[in-house]
């Protein structure tokens, strides 16, 4: 019983993970999503008006 259950889980688990991987890969490479991912890639490079540490200290002085 254990061997049958183990074989089933290994086989269908592998197939399931391959399907999930392929789905995520297609989603990531779909041309319609390119603008969304390009915008997300530029977020760390955007210059804020003021640093985050300065905004934290200014909010506490009321």
Image (cartoon, rainbow, N blue to C red):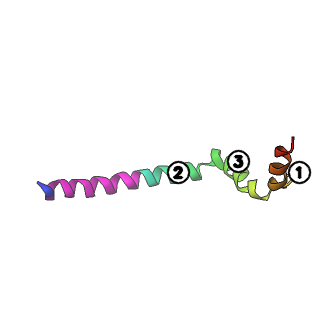
The residue pinned by badge 2 equals: 26
Q: CA distance from mark 1 to mark 2?
A: 37 Å
Whole-percent x, y for residue 29 in the image: 58, 53
The residue depicted at 70 percent of the width and 51 percent of the height is 40
The residue pinned by badge 3 equals: 35
7 vs 52, nearest the viewer: 52
Whole-percent x, y for residue 7 in the image: 20, 58
- Secondary element type, mark 3: helix
Q: CA distance from mark 3 to mark 1?
A: 24 Å
The residue at the far top in this view is 62
Quadrant of the rendered structure where residue 44 is? Answer: bottom right
Circle 1 residues within 10 Å: few <14, some 14–19, many ≥20:
few
Left or right for 4, reference 45: left
Whole-percent x, y for residue 62 in the image: 87, 40
- The mark found on residue 49 in the picture is 1
Q: Main SS of the magenta segment?
A: helix
Compare marks 3 and 2 and give the one earlier in the sequence.
Answer: 2
The residue depicted at 31 percent of the width and 54 percent of the height is 13
Left or right for 55, reference 15: right
Q: Which residues are magenta?
A: 3-19
Q: CA distance from mark 3 to mark 2?
A: 15 Å
Q: Quadrant of the N terminus?
A: bottom left
Q: How many numbered circles does the render carry?
A: 3
């Amino acid at each position: 019983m254990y061997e049958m259950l183990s074989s089933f889980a290994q086989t269908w688990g592998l197939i399931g993970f391959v399907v999930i991987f392929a789905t995520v890969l297609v989603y990531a490479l779909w041309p319609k999503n390119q603008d969304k991912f390009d915008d997300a890639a530029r977020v760390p490079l955007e210059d804020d008006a003021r640093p985050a540490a300065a905004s934290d200290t200014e909010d506490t002085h009321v």
